[in-house]
Amino acid sequence: MMMIIEKGMIKVSTTFERLLHWYLALTCLMLIFSGLGMMFHSFNFIAVPFGGLKNLKLVHNYTGLFFIPALLLTAFNWWKEAGTFDLPDDIEWLRKAGGYLWKVDRIPETGKYNPGQKVFFLTVVIVGLAMIGSGLLMLYPEGQSKELINWMYALHACGVVALLPFIVVHIYLGTVGVPGSAALVYTGYTSRAWCLSQCPKWLRKKEEDGTLEIFIGE
């Protein structure tokens, strides 16, 4: 469904950020599904549209090569805002789980990204780098010991287990869990009410330094 940018909505993400987000998301999802299709017999049906497991492996390997620049660009682009924590507020936010799991009296204000998003970001970067390293060794095992390659297969599998819960929660909160969030990855804009609820520190700073972009209509 097409999302409409309405007058008064605030620009939170740039076109580059949205494209990079989808670049990373699509390559990551393709790697997960193709990997599951090869790893578990019950998921072999995923290989059918690709013409079999041999072709699915090729898709997985080539997608992995596209994933490398996606992850590196993601880490470089968002490290300053999502790779560091604002102490002690972020620790307090995490201790209260952001108010998502139980009712709390007061939740510390957050910047553009809340501590939960920062944890997700760091998990994606760290696990992603481990997946790239292990994947390249599995793809080019020449000169490596069989024991090392076996460990790389185990590390690769553990990476999927570590990422899947984060990805499921991320998709849920980015759609129905926090209404208004989905618009950000499609249009880059959302409501002032959303900003006041999700990133009040960022909103206040943007207003103070005069860099807040508001859609005034065409």
Image (cartoon, grey):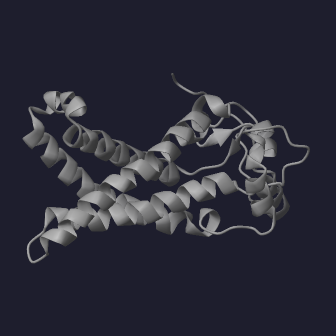
Q: Decide if residue 13 is on the left or right side of residue 99.
A: left
The residue drawn where x is 61% and y is 62% is 82
Question: In the figure, residue 10 lies in which quadrant?
Answer: top right
**Count of numbered labels shown in the rendering:** 0
Q: Nearer the viewer, residue 130 or 30?
A: 130
- Relative vertical location of residue 134 with respect to residue 100 in this rendering, above or below: below
The residue drawn where x is 19% and y is 53% is 61
- Relative vertical location of residue 200 with respect to residue 36 in this rendering, above or below: below
On the image, the x and y values in percent for residue 39 come to 22, 43
The residue drawn where x is 9% and y is 32% is 51
Question: In the figure, residue 202 lies in which quadrant?
Answer: bottom right
Quadrant the C terminus occupies: top right
Q: Is residue 113 visible?
A: no
The residue drawn where x is 32% and y is 53% is 157
Question: In the figure, residue 108 lies in which quadrant?
Answer: bottom right
Q: Nearer the viewer, residue 189 or 169?
A: 169
The residue lying furthest to the front in this view is 147
